[in-house]
Amino acid sequence: MKRFVLLILLLILFFPYLSSASQVIEDEDDILELLNCGEITYSQYLGLINLFNEKLNINKDNLFELQEIPKVSFLDIINILKYRDNYGEFNSISELKSILENKETFERIKPFIEVPKIKRKQLKLESRVYGSREISLHQEIQSFENLHLYYGKNISSYVSFQKDTESHRLEKIYLKLYKLGLFQNLALGDYKAKFGQGLIIWENFKGGALEIHSKNKRMNLTLIKNEDEEKGYLEGADLKILLFPKIDIGGTYLYNSDNKNKIFGGRINLNLSQSQFFIEVAKNKERYSYILGSRYISPSFSCYQYFKEYDSGFPNNYTYRFKVNDDGRKEYFWEFDYCLNKFWQIYGYYFQESNLVSILNDNTIFLKLFGKLSPKFDFNLSRELREKDTEKDKEKTEHTRLKLNFNLQPSFRTNIYFRYTQKPSQVDHYLKLDNIYKLTKNTKIKGEVKFQDTNVKKEGQKITTFNTTFEQNILSYFKYLLKYEHKKYSTDYNQEPKDNIKAQVEIKW
């Protein structure tokens, strides 16, 4: 442990002029990197991916979904909403610069919002093609390829496939249409859908979804059909009605054609000035499940909590199960986010899950401290403790994470990330150093080094990764990216080094 702390200090001493802003999200790979580094949870990752692709209308939508973005505080969101209420709609995203505390917060929010332009007299459409090819050497799988197609802001499609030594197989395909009159969304293929308030959740369909809303947006209806043979054929509907300005009700129906199982659910939400209260009840055969929760938001403090008792067969974005069994569970979750001032912020949560039959508990405590010591340096330090009951004993797992960000020069930035994990049978270390250098306004180079020791107590279980990325915007409508990655394994893995080459091209017209 001491040598890794010493290594971090040496990096700081030897690279005093390296710079790093907090990680800015520019594409879906950046969101995945946040998940890999432990900055966000898996559910936050799914939400950010969906938000990145669909984007929020800064003049019309509820902006509290932006709280999923790391280091975006509730105070920032409240300030944007107050400005919108007092001064009316935004004409451009750049107006946020005068509202938010610093430029970094603006850059983090920017990829997830839009200001739709009012089209008059003539209709101007923009098309964009985005394609990439990745070659993995010395492996059975030789290539990964994907193609994105955007036509204006209302149509997008995606196709991905991979080639191994024998065949070329399709991995994922979808077509999406957005905001077409009464039709808010139409999706065909592989897509994500979410129902309910947190009790009935289903993600990653292979079929179709249609979302319809009334002209005054007081009613919203979503219809789904899943045709995934592995996870079962599923049909469903979700209805939301705004009864009063502060109260809305909803209902969910799911039907599995394989086992003839049905789920019925209903919910109600009460939204006050700074608080929200909700309850959802669902029936799966003869079993009832429910969730009670509340959320409080003030300029400097937020609190979210819920209590849930449910049958573990309920469909959700982790298990995809759709059956009734005797494995009943209950959960309690409490989360807080407190901004002491513009330099310091504390975030934490407590989660407890219990098995009602075997009376086994799973407890997690998480605390994170954000600090901005100067405009050119900030850090976040977190600690997570998980205790899980087993039939024999109680298992403990501890995670300690430290991330340092340097921003000493406008054209060069550096991130240092370190993770220490202690499990009952092993201790893991993970260290990452990445540098991003902007050669010109349209050209940048990124270098990254990763070191992972999967079991400190045992010699030979280490993975070292080096990668270099070159990205250039040649013209306003043409951009390309080249990436090379080398991964080396220690002797105990009994694996040869791996080399990946990725080429990516983006064209607009």
Image (tube, rainbow, N blue to C red):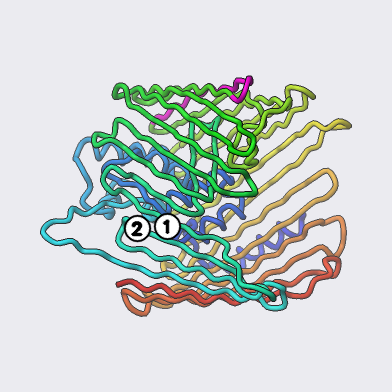
Residue drawn at (58%, 38%) of the image: 257
Determine which residue is flagged by label 1: 175
Image height of 40 relative to 297, above or below? below
Q: Are marks 1 and 2 in contact (CB under 8 Å)?
A: yes
Q: Which residues are magenta?
A: 284-298
Query: Which residue is at a point 58% across and 41% down the rendered structure image?
Result: 317
How many residues crowd around disc 1 within 10 Å: few (fewer than 14), some, or many (20 or more)?
Answer: some
- Which of these two is toward me, 401 or 500? 500
Is 20 positioned to the left or the right of 171 in the image?
A: left
Task: Give the vertical position of 9 relative to 59 (above or below).
Answer: below
- For marks 1 and 2, the one nearer the N-term is 2
Q: Which residue is mark 2?
A: 155
Q: Eyeballing the image, is 422 above or below 296? A: below
Given the image, on which type of amino acid does mark 2 rest?
Answer: Ile
Q: Residues within 10 Å of mark 2 (few under 14, many from 20)?
A: some
Residue at x 65% of width, y 38% of height: 321
- Residue 186, percent from left and from top: 38, 49
Majority secondary structure of magenta residues: strand
Q: Is residue 293 magenta?
A: yes
Residue 372: tell me if it is visible: no
Pick the quarter of the image with the N terminus: bottom right
Residue flagged by tag 1: what amino acid is it? Leu
3 to the left or right of 407: right
